[in-house]
Amino acid sequence: MTCASCVNRVERKLGKLDGVQASVNLPLESAQVTVPAAITDQQIVDTVNAIGYTAKLRQPPTPYPAPSASTATDAHDAPFAASKLKPRLIVAAVLTLPVFLISMIPALQFPNWGWVAGVLALPVVSWAAWPFHRAAAINARHLASTMDTLVSIGVSAAYLFSVWQLAIDPRMTEHPGMAGMDSGALYFEVAAVVTTFLLLGRFLEANAKRKAGDALRALLNLGAKDATVLRDGTEHKVPAGQLRVGDVVVVRPGEKIATDGVVIDGSSAVDASLLTGESVPVEVGPESKVTGATINTSGRLLVRATRVGAETTLAQMARLVSQAQTGKAPIARLADRISAVFVPVVLVIAVLTFVLWLAFSGPGVDGSELLAAFTAAVAVLVIACPCALGLATPVGLLTGTGRGAQLGILIKGPQVLEDTRTVDTILLDKTGTVTTGKLAVDNTVVFDGYHSTDVLRLAGAVEAASEHPIAHAIAAAAFDGGRPPAVENFRSAPGGGVEGTVEGQVVLAGRTGWLTDNGIRISASQQQALAAAEATGATAIWVAVNGAPSGLISLRDTIKPGSAAAIARLKELGLRPVLLTGDNAAVAQQVAAAVGISSDDVYAGVLPAGKVEAVRKLQAGGAIVAMAGDGVNDAAALAQADLGIAMGSGTDVAIEAADLTVMGNDLGQVAQAIELSRRTLATIKTNLFWAFFYNAIGIPVAALGLLNPMIAGAAMAASSVLVVANSLRLRRFGK
């Protein structure tokens, strides 16, 4: 498939089968088809093949693919595949440059330069432009037309007319600077330039389409590839795909948990941020449930597998991403929609022009009258040649995306621009998008005359010997890169805390249970201080010195400095910000209040599948939804949203699932990305208006014989210059 017309044709043809519903996705070159029992898979494939395309059944992705496995349709052999377009683009560019220079600069012309230009342009308009000619032929066979039809006709008309001019008047380029002004003109450069620019646009599109399945592959590849299984007291390493329910898996510190299961022995802190977005590692012990692809940060665990293969949480998330991508609305490019009507109209006008000129010439048509009729008809085709129309979208897109790249904003394709124009609601993932996603010490409460600096320093010294992420945050706050005091008699308990002797004082830091296990009594007022800290959504850690509580250290995920200003800017753009997080309600409400989001627009405690449901719920209510996130847990929601925006500091999965990517971690770039996209879309629409304006004025004038083909070519060139100049204004965006 090459355009929106292809999508509509496949959907319409499949829809004619009794009881069949089809949703066709252009970037993925795939269709999700719902069929009754009476319809076979082969009937579906044959129906698509019958209208000029090649269909095959797409196998569902496996939860543990080989490194080379691809979950997207392999379109390497398609005419518009990037690998096929690249050599054509290179050849076209190399040959077009001398053709353009010779044709447009009289000082470079030499005797009979027209023949040289014609020979150089021939490979461009034939071999390089072959994908357009092939697509136009397939469409013509089914009585349809697309942008490819316009390109094929325009390029062929310009080239063949030029060859014809040289054939009837071989002397028209005998002298430099002359091209037969009285009998016509040469348009070899028109044919070559149109082909080269459009090949460039298609090459960039093909690259984007080739990456459409990367989100799913990246998500699947997060899973552990191998697992250590305990059998008869002996450890065996096996591929993760061979695990069975009931297997006991050994997970050492730093390793990924291979599959969903239940801990049967050991205690540890599990980093589940990739899947849940939670910034705080989850403490686990016997009977705790764990999820595949999460990371064991500290102690050794024995996990009994409860779900394997396609039933794991990771595989289910992969299905969510796949379903959301396949169900996306097809790209509807304005030029393609208009060309479906425009091309047949131009062809009819050209034929009518030729016929009517002969009819009004009276009996006994001579050579000059035949030439006049043919010249008028060719002038219609030349003025209708889609040079500006073909440049309108790719040049605007190239300039807009080029400026975006300078600003750290990546726009994946033309359909993204239309999506930014219509969105009215934006879902913001909290962790890593609105906040930094990293724990930091927020406050220190002290007891019994201790000073906060001393409590933090002693706790930081003993925590510096631990590998736990919370310990790292406390040590960083205490010493800021400096050297902590030496610790003696250090010991730690996974899920509990740490103990050590610092400067002669016995220091404990950890959870409430850790203190009570070590015989330390906590008073009622101190318990109230703990409850008050946790009520704000903070993670509170006890510090005890010489057997008595000395303070509480509160840690929380910190808000990014520019988040509040960015959300205010999003509101100015007409968007309603909604906060979405897997954290608890207290944390979510505090963050929302700090950045200016209404308390009614907060979704807390949301799991990955719940984030997709939140998007769908808003969409069902009539909202056009954008989603901004950075974690694996956001990937499915990014794909489901009408516009997915990934923070570049996040995971590859989120970036590949999104439509827009901001390479920094500043939420302000999200607002800037939406504004740039809208500006680029407006520029493209202006380009299309001027492209069609020249056609609307020029075609009737050419049909009346008042427009020499050379002037038609000049008008067409002027429209192209206007389109390019209008697009270049985007280079000043943000300055």
Image (cartoon, rainbow, N blue to C red):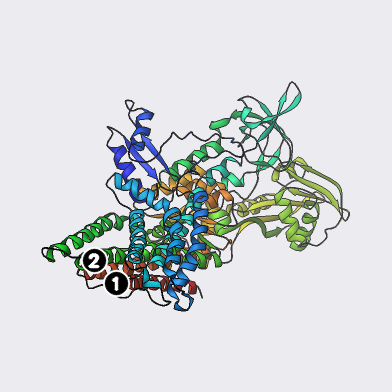
Q: Residues within 10 Å of mark 2 (few under 14, many from 20)?
A: some
In x, y percent, where is residue 248?
Answer: 68, 27
For the question of whether residue 567 can be seen, the reply is no
Q: Quadrant of residue 574?
A: bottom left
Q: Quadrant of residue 340?
A: bottom left
In x, y percent, where is residue 151?
Answer: 36, 58
In x, y percent, where is residue 355?
Answer: 17, 60
The amino acid type found where label 2 is placed reads Leu
Q: Are marks 1 and 2 in contact (CB under 8 Å)?
A: yes
Dot 1 corresponds to which residue? 183
The secondary structure type at the circle numbered 2 is helix
- Residue in front for this viewpoint, 407 or 232: 407
Name the side, left or right, on which 446 lies relative to 633.
right
Q: Residue furthest top?
A: 232
- When the figure is inspected, residue 612 is found, relative to residue 335, above or below; the finding is above
The amino acid type found where label 1 is placed reads Ser
The secondary structure type at the circle numbered 1 is loop
Residue 631: assigned label: none
- Residue in front for this viewpoint, 731 or 461: 731
For image coordinates 31% across by 71% down, the residue present is 184
For image coordinates 20% across by 63% down, the residue present is 353
Query: Disc 1 or 2, which lies upstream in sequence?
Result: 1
Q: Residue furthest left?
A: 363
Name the side, left or right, on which 273 lies relative to 444.
left
Q: CA distance from mark 1 to mark 2?
A: 9 Å
Name the side, left or right, on which 460 lies relative to 734.
right
Q: How many marks?
A: 2
- Residue in front for this viewpoint, 694 or 360: 360
In x, y percent, where is residue 74?
Answer: 50, 41
For image coordinates 77% across by 54% down, the residue present is 459
- When the figure is inspected, residue 697 is found, relative to residue 542, above or below; the finding is below
Dot 2 corresponds to which residue? 371
